[in-house]
Image: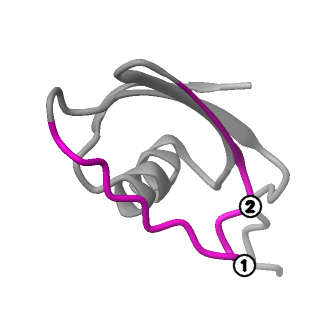
Amino acid sequence: MNNIIDFPKDVKYKVLFNLPRGKVIKISKGAEDDFDVTINGRHGEAVVPARGKESAGGVIQKCFPSSEIVEVTKV
């Protein structure tokens, strides 16, 4: 009997987020954070490889600590 659950590792999520108004934006993106980000004004969009919606949003919160997650959808 096999009790190992194999979660897919190639799932990507599109994360929409807002940046604060009138503040300096702090970015903490490292080499391990391999994703593309598009920022237009106060709104950002990123396609993040992750194992779930929560972890995809967490990656953005780590890289952009002052951001507000708006929506996370599976791509």
Q: Is residue 5 above or below residue 37?
A: below
- Identify the residue at image location x=22%, y=48%: 66
Q: Quick check: is 27 in the magenta stretch? A: yes
Under circle 1, the secondary element is loop
Under circle 2, the secondary element is loop
Label disc, if present, on residue 34 of the rendered structure: 2
State which quadrant residue 45 falls in: top right
66 sits left or right of 54 in the view? left
- Tag 2: residue type? Asp
The first of marks 2 and 1 along the sequence is: 1
- Quadrant for the N terminus in the image: bottom right
- Tag 1: residue type? Asn
- Identify the residue at image location x=41%, y=18%: 41
The one nearer the camera, 34 or 26, is: 26
The one nearer the camera, 38 or 53, is: 38
Q: Which residue is mark 1?
A: 3
